[in-house]
Amino acid sequence: MPPRKRPLEPSSSMPPASDVKPVIPPLSKSPDAPVPSDAPEPEVPPISAAILNNLPPSERDVYKRIYAAGNKGMWSKDLRYAMSLSAPLLGKITRALVQRGILKEVTDVRHRSKKVFMDARIEPSSEITGGTWFHNGQLDTDAVAAVRRRCLDQVDRLGAATPDMVHKGVERADPKAGYMIDQIREILKTMALDRVLEECKSTGEGEFSAVRAGRICYRRGGAPQGGMMEGIPCGVCPRIDECSPDGVISPTTCVYYKKWLQMDF
């Protein structure tokens, strides 16, 4: 038999093997399933040279500045100060760009009175739209009510449960629901604020026997533990970062804050 040839060892003169990434098909989900809140933001498309070449200088500069803001968009007032433009002139430019389909105006759920502009090809971030539980800038009360019922069913079934246990139970009950663990955590927090559920720490005994001692879990609602300041809803609110005086989420419109103020401590 002829001697077997040894495989060639890579040398500095040989080109490196190209990195081939496997194509993973997206998981099929129910069309009614919510978009995962922790899903990566869509990639921002490159700036269009064709658009730039067909714009007059003033519109080109405004478009480039707004494009640079990406999926967060840019508030008209910030844009006016950044570019030292008068309100009437900026309004004329942005209207022209919107009419041509180059820009779009979106609603920021945190500041509904503000005009936010972004590239028409870019989808606004969840920070702007409000995320899973908002649709067209409005809270989707039906979607929230549906997931709250599912979470409550799991807590009633288990007696006391961690967010992971609730999430797995919801997935088993309806594999097409498509909820992510962060969404379940957020809903459980709001249910605790409503006193539908109680957030507590497991003792590992009795009704907590299925939950390891020391872990945070939820059971059917009860009186809040601790004093007045410990019970303030702002400390556990999952939307605290989006709360502002003139936003959709604000101290003046927050039902949890009003309930807390009316409590007899």
Image: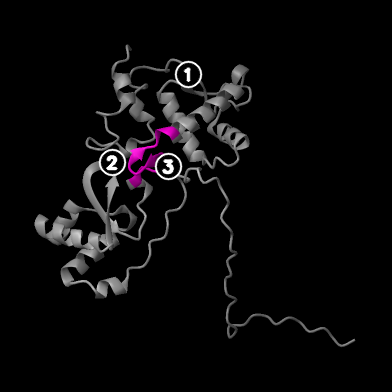
Q: Residue at x 58, y 25 (%)?
A: 213
Q: Secondary structure at mark 1?
A: loop
Q: Quadrant of the C terminus?
A: top left
Residue 151 coordinates in the image, percent (x, y) = 52, 29
Residue that label 3 marks: 132
Q: Residue at x 28, y 41 (%)?
A: 110
Q: In the rendered structure, which disc, 3 or 1, sits on the residue that comes first in sequence?
A: 3
Marks 3/1 in contact by CB < 8 Å: the verdict is no
Q: Secondary structure at mark 3?
A: loop
Q: Residues within 10 Å of mark 3 (few under 14, many from 20)?
A: some
Q: Residues within 10 Å of mark 1 (few under 14, many from 20)?
A: some
Q: In the rendered structure, which disc, 2 or 3, sits on the residue that comes first in sequence?
A: 2
Residue that label 1 marks: 221
Q: What's under tag 1, amino acid-wise? A: Gly
Q: Quadrant of the N terminus?
A: bottom right
Q: In the rendered structure, which disc, 1 or 2, sits on the residue that comes first in sequence?
A: 2
Q: Is residue 13 left or right of residue 261?
A: right
Residue 142 bears which disc, if any? none
1 in relation to 197, above or below: below
Q: What's under tag 3, amino acid-wise? A: Thr
Residue 232 coordinates in the image, percent (x, y) = 34, 24
199 in relation to 223, above or below: below
Q: Magenta residues? A: 129-142
Q: What's under tag 2, amino acid-wise? A: Arg
Residue 237 coordinates in the image, percent (x, y) = 37, 31
92 in relation to 185, above or below: below
Residue that label 2 marks: 110
